[in-house]
Image (cartoon, rainbow, N blue to C red):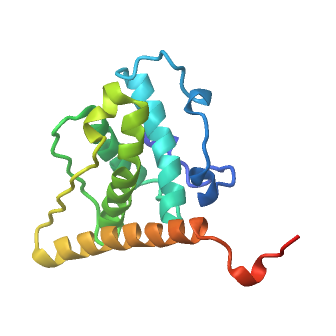
Amino acid sequence: MTFDEYDDDEQFEEINPQFYLEEHSVEEEFEEDEDQLTQEFVDRLIDKMMQFMHVLVGHDLHSYQKPLSRRIIEAVLIGKGDEITALASRQSGKSETVADTVAMLMVLLPKLAKIYPDLLGKYKDGLWVGLFAPTEGQAETLSSVTQLLLTLLLLTLLQLTAPPPTDSLHLL
């Protein structure tokens, strides 16, 4: 994977959170009998998860943040206990990248585990996450950002699934 693959000018179709509340066929993107344990399959799944994260957090990552996010996702998907390090300047969005990625994984993996049990069955009951940083303050910041993202997601889902107010109902 090259750095040139990540282009900030990349255009996305309009993606609405409502889309993810509706039933959609996964077979449109992946063949039913496709081997879930190939690198090609994992790479395509990561692409789709990156698109979902864009919708989930409300913004796209910068081109220099995407390789770190993709690497974290790949390590979780294939179950390697890799130690992943990132060397980046101050205020470049390292914590934001990790928080966005972790929040997306916590939301999406239990659902994907039902669709791809060979690859992701171990996440059917959820994903436990520990967030660590060099100082307690940094760890608290990272944890707070992740919790805020998950809380905002929950509030958005509650709004999308709430019944309409009674004053807007019209009886026939």
Quarter where residue 140 is shown: bottom left
Q: Is residue 1 visible?
A: no
Up/down of 94 relative to 90, above or below: above
Quarter where residue 114 is shown: top left
User: In the rendering, at what x and y percent does residue 56 appear?
Assistant: 49, 60
Q: Quadrant of the N terminus?
A: top left
Up/down of 49 relative to 41, above or below: below
Q: In which quarter of the image is the C terminus?
A: bottom right
Q: Is residue 163 visible?
A: yes
Q: Which residue lies furthest to the bottom in this view?
A: 167
- Which residue is more in the foreground, 51 or 107? 107
Residue 140 located left or right of residue 90? left
Report the number of numbered marks.
Answer: 0
User: In the rendering, at what x and y percent does residue 144 appear?
Assistant: 28, 75
Up/down of 124 relative to 148, above or below: above
- Which residue is more in the foreground, 57 or 167? 167
Residue 134 located left or right of residue 140? left
User: In the rendering, at what x and y percent does residue 164 appear?
Assistant: 68, 74
Task: Name the residue located 77 percent from the left edge and 76 percent from the top edge.
Answer: 169
Q: Residue furthest front?
A: 172
Task: Name the residue located 58 percent from the left edge and 53 percent from the top edge.
Answer: 21
Up/down of 166 relative to 44, above or below: below
User: In the rendering, at what x and y percent does residue 16 appear?
Assistant: 64, 58
Task: Name the residue located 32 percent from the left edge and 67 percent from the top edge.
Answer: 146
Q: Residue furthest right?
A: 172
Task: Name the residue located 32 percent from the left edge and 34 percent from the top edge.
Answer: 120
